[in-house]
Amino acid sequence: MTDEAVTVELAESVRSIDAAVWDSCACPETRVAGSTGRARDPFTTHRFLAALEESGSVGAGSGWDPRPLVARQDGEVIAVAPLYVKSHSQGEYIFDHSWAQAYERAGGRYYPKLQVAVPFTPVTGRRLLARPGFERAGHAALAEGIRRIGAENGISSAHVTFCTEEEAAHLSGAGFLPRVTQQYHWESRGYQTFDDFLADLSSRKRKAIRKERARAQAFGGTIRALTGAALEPEHWDAMWAFYQDTGARKWGTPYLTRAFFELVQARMRDDVVLFLAERDGVPVAGALNFIGRDTLYGRYWGCVEDHPCLHFELCYYQAIDWALARGMTRVEAGAQGEHKLARGYLPVQVHSAHWIGDVGFSNAVARYLREERAAMDHEIEVLTAWGPFRKDAPEEQD
């Protein structure tokens, strides 16, 4: 590493950057000798972000204009960040709608804004992506680059969402406002099997989950876990129907295009596992998960028939079973959902960092975030205490 100045510029798209160059920053762990070859998570890999672009899920007309940030030293790329110019606040899951409304009521223009994120993906992961050995210089250059681009272009704000806690701390030192929200994650406590997990719960919760699983599995069909070569084009026809149903109910219009799922089949089959429920050979429900190095990420669920508890079985319990069988230690089942608590998914902190150009408005948001953080810390503490796990000595097993 030299003392040569680091330059930062916007690229036209993720696809305009060589995949090997991008991934040398985004997932260098895949190149370490003896590794499994899996990224910590697949969402900032070139193949995932490029698929969003190529499929038209982001880009013209979507409100997500990809303009990735690239830092170079001595002409070599040392760091990148998945930056988007946003014309709305949809598909982010760290909500700033009230900020936008307040700023515009005061006469400001909130949009466009800058967003460093993985579109439509409420998953914590690295956002300031640097090659090994260049982390300090790369992170500093990216943080300064985000602020500079926002200020020079009169943009109201920049938001780095679902970043790591370490990144949030670094960005806080660079003039960003740190924010803490929450999700529900399942974590192994050294379990080998699902029964080991159940043994860690209170008797009442243990019985409730067993009853729930039995009810779900009595839907009159079979459940399969499909990944890699086992996935066929017709499975994506089913998943698209499921996704359309859920998207229509949740968002009005689904975020992803049909072409995105075709690209997953073509290029990322080994990155996903689909839990598929079939009755008389016909798919009736499914849950699509992405596979990380140590974590299984539940992303999309849907159904064309309603069956009691099948949602819980496919999204939560099948995921735990599958993860444990492969030595994984964590399952993340997406945003929101306090119903996850009774099923062993406990609240955890989620981090983001926000730069706001208007000093007065920034100060107001900072006050709001301090109050929100205190309330969030209390809520996490209370909800954790309400969790399903045993509070004292082991109970008699049932």
Image (cartoon, grey):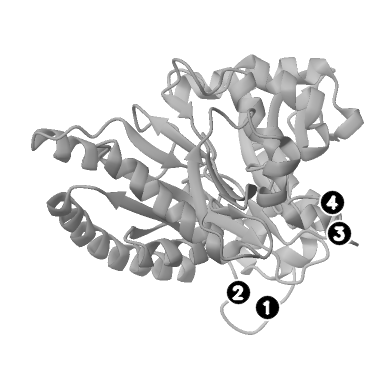
CA distance separating discs 2 and 4: 37 Å
Neighbourhood count class around disc 3 (C-alpha, 10 Å): few under 14, some 14–19, many 20 upward: few
Dot label at residue 145? none
One can see residue 25 in this view: yes
366 or 358: nearer the viewer: 358
Residue farthest left in this picture = 106
Q: Nearer the viewer, mark 3 or mark 1?
A: 3
Q: Earlier in the sequence, mark 2 or mark 4?
A: 4
Residue under numbered circle 1:
395
Q: Earlier in the sequence, mark 1 or mark 4?
A: 4
Q: Position of residue 302 (x, y in %)?
A: 61, 26
> Viewed as shown, does residue 29 lie left or right of 131?
right
Label 1: element kind: loop
CA distance separating discs 1 and 4: 41 Å
Q: Is residue 219 above or below residue 77?
A: above
Q: Which amino acid type is marked by label 2?
A: Arg
Neighbourhood count class around disc 2 (C-alpha, 10 Å): few under 14, some 14–19, many 20 upward: some
Q: Which amino acid type is marked by label 1?
A: Glu
275 or 140: nearer the viewer: 140
> Viewed as shown, does residue 171 lie left or right of 255?
left
Q: Earlier in the sequence, mark 2 or mark 1?
A: 2
Q: Dividing the picture into quarters, in which one does residue 84 lie?
A: top left
Neighbourhood count class around disc 4 (C-alpha, 10 Å): few under 14, some 14–19, many 20 upward: some
One can see residue 224 in this view: no
Q: Earlier in the sequence, mark 2 or mark 3?
A: 3
Identified at 34% across, 47% down, the residue is 148
Q: Which amino acid type is marked by label 3?
A: Ser
